[in-house]
Image (cartoon, rainbow, N blue to C red):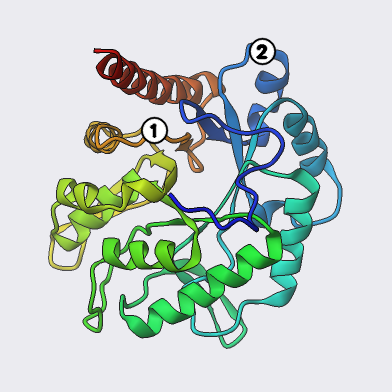
């Protein structure tokens, strides 16, 4: 994968390819600081830490001293047509400069319109007009924070008829033009595949795996649309499904080993439950690394 020379790949505390992490939850603080090391890194949502000081930063500083950190943004509106919010971008730069994360990622989505922030990550048409906007925004973010960002494939519930390329083709074009990496959210693939009726395994096979710098795994909620068809909601409120684990193994076998995060943001379980999911991801990574090493030695 090509990395633009002016972008640092990671902070001073890097995350290895065979590493599994979890989102940092304040209800887990006591277990994390007093118990055995159960995860390899932690991830935070950037927007939760853009305020100055207080308990959130106190915990984060303590965690950052002992663990690599990944910062995941949800508010840049990378896929929007409007200019990026400069104040938001400045707050993001301050956060990145202060904590020097190993990874920074954002969604291929938009969430603002005419100065109004929408509480959703919304899809965009995959065409040359959108591609130009996204690439310009990715370039601006990377130039501002001084590090490569990872762009995440979204979970979607509607699709645009104006699209002229597939999602995987669009992501490949962004990565090639900007030098950014990609975050492959395997749960999002499954959610979107069920909602739109495409083949999730074929999507994994078509994904530009050479640009992947991180994986996400999560649980989903099941519902039905107005016509009674299955509808999956990316709610991060359950264990990772067996279908998603199988798609994850398929991605690792292509092959691409990369740090893997287990997201569990709603109905947050005891830390031991979350750590068991993280351990399962680490086991999968180690198994694929072992098979690769054995093949190389044969």
Q: SS of the residue at dot 2?
A: loop
Residue located 43% across and 35% down the image: 258
Q: Nearer the viewer, mark 2 or mark 1?
A: 1
Image: 171 above or below 209: below
Q: In which quadrant is the C terminus drawn?
A: top left
CA separation in Å, label 2 and label 1: 28 Å
- How far across and how far down the image is residue 205, in percent? 20, 47
- The residue at which mark 2 appears reads as 35
- How far across and how far down the image is residue 43, in percent? 59, 40
Residue located 63% across and 43% down the image: 10
Q: Decide which of tag 2 and tag 1 comes sooner along the chain.
A: 2
**Residue 197 visible to the viewer:** yes
Residue 283 position by quadrant: top left
Q: Is residue 150 left or right of residue 248?
A: right
Image: 167 above or below 266: below
Residue 277 position by quadrant: top left
Say which mark, if any, is on residue 257: 1
The furthest residue to the right:
53
Residue located 85% across and 45% down the image: 54
- How far across and how far down the image is residue 48, in percent? 68, 53
Image: 173 above or below 58: below
| Foreground of the two, 11 or 271 | 11
Give the class, few, some or many, for how many residues have Cα within 10 Å of label 1's Cα (few <14, many ≥20). Answer: many
- How far across and how far down the image is residue 189, in percent? 28, 51
């Amino acid at each position: 994968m090509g990395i633009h020379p002016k972008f640092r790949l990671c902070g001073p505390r890097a995350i290895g390819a065979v590493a599994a992490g979890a989102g940092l939850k304040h209800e887990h603080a006591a277990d994390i600081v007093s118990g055995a090391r159960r995860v390899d890194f932690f991830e935070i949502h950037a927007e939760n830490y853009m305020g100055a000081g207080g308990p959130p930063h106190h915990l984060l500083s303590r965690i950052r001293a002992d663990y690599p950190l990944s910062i995941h943004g949800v508010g840049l509106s990378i896929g929007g047509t409007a200019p990026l919010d400069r104040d938001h971008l400045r707050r993001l730069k301050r956060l990145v400069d202060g904590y020097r994360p190993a990874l920074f990622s954002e969604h291929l989505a938009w969430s603002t319109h005419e100065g109004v922030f929408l509480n959703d990550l919304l899809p965009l048409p995959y065409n040359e007009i959108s591609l130009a906007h996204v690439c310009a925004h990715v370039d601006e973010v990377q130039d501002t924070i001084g590090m490569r960002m990872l762009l995440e494939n979204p979970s979607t519930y509607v699709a645009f008829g104006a699209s002229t390329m597939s999602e995987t083709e669009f992501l490949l074009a962004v990565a090639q033009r900007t030098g950014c990496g990609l975050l492959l959210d395997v749960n999002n693939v499954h959610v979107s595949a069920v909602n739109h009726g495409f083949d999730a395994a074929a999507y994994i096979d078509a994904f530009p795996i050479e640009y992947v710098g991180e994986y996400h795994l999560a649980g989903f909620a099941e519902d039905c649309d107005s016509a009674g068809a299955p509808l999956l909601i990316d709610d991060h409120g359950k264990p990772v499904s067996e279908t998603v684990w199988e798609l994850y193994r398929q991605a690792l076998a292509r092959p691409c080993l990369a740090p893997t995060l287990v997201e569990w943001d709603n109905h947050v379980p005891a830390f031991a439950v979350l750590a068991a999911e993280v351990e399962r991801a680490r086991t999968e990574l180690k198994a694929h690394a072992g098979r690769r090493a054995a093949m190389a030695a044969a």
